[in-house]
Amino acid sequence: HDLEEQKFLARLAARLDKAVQGGETQSLIVVAPPRAIGLLRREFSAHVRQAVKAEVEKDYVKMPVDEITRHLA
């Protein structure tokens, strides 16, 4: 399970790098559980690190969308 999580986060970091370098986005706010953010930080390229404007270390996976929206507003 841990290995699969690490692979997923590495793919996510690579996709974010592609999005930043390709001009799809100029800035990012990363919302993830603390452990995932820690793993992502190690995978982020310099371009992604510069694009990250904020990090929210919370696990909102099991919350309904309207409740997540309230927390992030």
Image: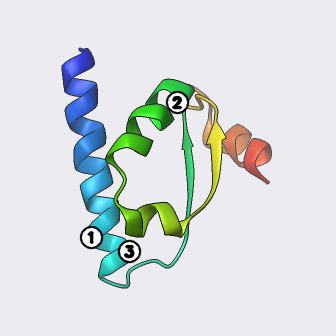
Residue 41 location in percent, x, y? 44, 44
What residue does disc 2 label? Answer: 61
Could you tell me how many numbered marks the image carries?
3
Disc 1 element: helix
Assess disc 3: are there few (<14), some (14-19) or many (≥20) residues with their C-alpha within 10 Å of its C-alpha: some
Assess disc 1: are there few (<14), some (14-19) or many (≥20) residues with their C-alpha within 10 Å of its C-alpha: some
Q: Considering the image in quadrants, where does the C terminus appear?
A: bottom right
> Which amino acid, by three-letter code, is at mark 2?
Val
Q: Considering the image in quadrants, where does the N terminus appear?
A: top left
> Which amino acid, by three-letter code, is at mark 1?
Lys
**Which residue is found at the position 37% from the left and 41% from the top?**
42
> Which amino acid, by three-letter code, is at mark 3?
Val
Q: Are marks 3 and 2 in contact (CB under 8 Å)?
A: no
Cα distance in 3D space between marks 1 and 2: 25 Å
**Which residue is found at the position 24% from the left and 37% from the top?**
8
Q: Are marks 1 and 3 in contact (CB under 8 Å)?
A: yes
What residue does disc 3 label? Answer: 20
What residue does disc 1 label? Answer: 18
**Looking at the image, is 49 positioned above or below residue 3?**
below
Q: Which of marks 3 and 2 is in front?
A: 3
Residue 34 located left or right of residue 23: right
Disc 2 element: loop
